[in-house]
Image: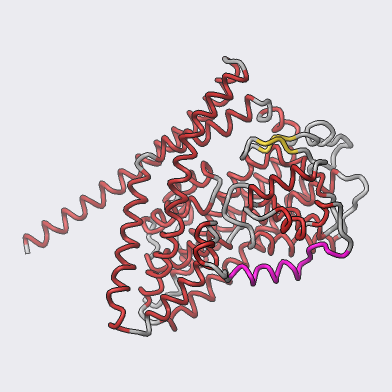
């Protein structure tokens, strides 16, 4: 008995030290972000532009190494965790209710995010209060910060280059999806049915290795669910395989914890490089001032959804304090803000969710799928951006029916958005085309998209983690 009690006390002390270590890590990450922003604002004023840009470029290499280290874990972690989650159910037939709850949660929260975005943008009315458009000077030539490539709103060739870099698709395929980029081919504009068809095709890949190489997670998740479900029906004949999958999942999570030890350094490099380059190019404070109405609209909408709507859903299903849960997810939210990628943040989100009390089976099943298709922040952003762009165009007046079309299209387009930085720019073209808005006005938001992308990624991550907690209630205890 004394040995057992001593063992329990030892494990309890280990758990306490584990939580304390993670608490310190959160403080270190916050300190890294604050220090990075201060460095980005101060350094360009002390040095020449070229020198400052060179320094921030060098810092950015460290951030890119950290981001790539996170991304290289995503594919093996997703496959191992989804399979482990399915195998943990013991019987694939038990997946029915949790799967239904997960899909219902994804759809309902995305729709709610779009509704919140439309309500806020109609109240604040950015771009509609004056005849002066922020596109008059800056939008004709905007620096796309993610690649450092100059993109003009009127130069369709450069925009194709940007989309090719973001999506990995060939220019010809992009031009077929968005014919306005090759001069506008009549009758070929992408509509809602094309989006639905593409969403169905996204579930499957003719080459899983290619899907893994391009971090196309959805077909990998579908394969993992089907394969692991098959394994649950084969009993002891596949015992060795199931053990390997479980052990691989545990090893990947240990890798996550190892990588988190250098997270403050990597996050400092990422934030300092991005903010510093923008400030050195005169595109941080100046652009924020010129598009302040739109920025306030998006941040207000994301704040309402992330701090009111999602917590209300969490409390409704769990009867627990949602803000305590949000505090437990702080490391994941800060990492999402720093990387601007829900896929890269996935390993951290899974670790934080388990610490916050969500079961491993719900975390393994819900979060990889959520990081792929649950994009609340992106849906809200695209709906608000479409109304803002419409306000900038004096020849456009949106009706209530047009806003309904925007809501539906933004919901579907957000589901199809990849979990990579600035992927929303690609699906934004679909939303604009659905109501006949000119894609050239995207130039008005390109300059600050990289900044707002971080806030909406954090919202996406919060929505995923709350989804895991909600779905956890549907599992048989």
Residue, far right: 395
Q: Nearer the viewer, residue 132 or 264?
A: 264
Q: Which residues are magenta?
A: 187-203
* Image point (49%, 80%), residue name: 96
* Image point (82%, 62%), residue name: 189
* Image point (67%, 38%), residue name: 144
Q: Is residue 407 highlighted in magenta?
A: no
Quarter of the image where one finds residue 129: top right
Q: Is residue 190 highlighted in magenta?
A: yes
Image x and y of residue 17, in percent: 25, 46
Quarter of the image where one finds residue 450: top right
Count of marks overlaid on the render: 0
Coloration mode: secondary structure
Q: Nearer the viewer, residue 343 or 62?
A: 62
Image x and y of residue 273, in percent: 54, 32
Image x and y of residue 321, in percent: 46, 57
Q: Nearer the viewer, residue 54 or 429?
A: 54
Image x and y of residue 131, in percent: 89, 37
From the viewer's perspective, tell me whether residue 320 is left or right of residue 113: left
As displayed, is residue 452 above or below residue 78? above
From the viewer's perspective, tell me whether residue 312 is left or right of residue 350: right
Quarter containing the N terminus = bottom left
Quarter containing the C terminus = bottom left
Residue, far left: 2
């Amino acid at each position: 008995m004394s040995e057992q009690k001593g063992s329990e006390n030892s494990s309890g002390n280990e758990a306490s030290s584990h939580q304390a270590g993670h608490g310190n890590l959160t403080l270190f990450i916050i300190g890294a972000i604050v220090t990075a922003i201060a460095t980005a604002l101060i350094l360009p004023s002390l040095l020449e532009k070229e020198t400052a840009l060179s320094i921030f470029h060098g810092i950015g290499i460290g951030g890119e190494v950290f981001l790539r280290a996170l991304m290289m874990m995503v594919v093996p972690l997703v496959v191992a965790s989804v399979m482990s989650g399915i195998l943990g159910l013991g019987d694939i037939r038990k997946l029915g209710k949790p799967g239904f709850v997960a899909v219902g949660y994804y759809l309902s929260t995305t729709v709610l995010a779009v509704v919140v975005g439309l309500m806020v943008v109609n109240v604040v009315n950015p771009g509609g209060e004056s005849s002066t458009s922020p596109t008059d000077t800056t939008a004709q030539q905007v620096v796309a910060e993610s690649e450092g490539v100059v993109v003009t709103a009127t130069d369709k060739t450069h925009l194709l280059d940007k989309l090719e870099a973001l999506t990995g698709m060939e220019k010809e395929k992009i031009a077929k999806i968005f014919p306005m980029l090759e001069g506008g081919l009549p009758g070929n504009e992408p509509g809602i049915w094309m989006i639905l068809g593409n969403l169905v095709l996204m579930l499957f890949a003719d080459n899983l290795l290619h899907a893994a190489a391009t971090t196309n997670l959805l077909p990998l998740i579908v394969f993992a669910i089907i394969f692991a479900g098959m394994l649950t029906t084969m009993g002891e004949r596949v015992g060795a395989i199931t053990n390997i999958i479980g052990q691989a999942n545990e090893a990947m999570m240990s890798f996550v914890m190892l990588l988190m030890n250098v997270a403050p350094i990597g996050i400092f490099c990422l934030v300092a490089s991005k903010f510093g380059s923008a400030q050195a190019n005169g595109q941080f404070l100046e652009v924020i001032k010129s598009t302040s109405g739109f920025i306030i609209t998006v941040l207000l909408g994301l704040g309402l959804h992330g701090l009111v709507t999602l917590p209300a859903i969490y409390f409704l299903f769990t009867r627990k304090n949602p803000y305590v849960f949000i505090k437990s997810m702080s490391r994941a939210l800060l990492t999402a803000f720093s990387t601007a990628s829900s896929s890269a943040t996935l390993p951290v989100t899974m670790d934080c969710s388990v610490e916050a009390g969500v079961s491993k089976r719900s975390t393994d099943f819900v979060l990889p799928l959520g990081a792929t298709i649950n994009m609340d922040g992106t849906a809200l952003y695209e709906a608000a951006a479409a109304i803002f762009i419409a306000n900038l165009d004096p020849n456009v007046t949106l009706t209530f029916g047009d806003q309904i079309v925007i809501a539906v299209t933004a919901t579907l387009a957000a589901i199809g958005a990849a979990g990579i930085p600035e992927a929303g720019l690609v699906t934004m073209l679909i939303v604009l085309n659905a109501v006949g808005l000119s894609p050239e006005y995207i130039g008005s938001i390109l300059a600050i998209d990289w900044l707002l992308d971080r806030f909406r990624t954090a919202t996406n991550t919060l929505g995923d983690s709350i989804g895991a907690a909600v779905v956890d209630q549907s599992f048989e205890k």
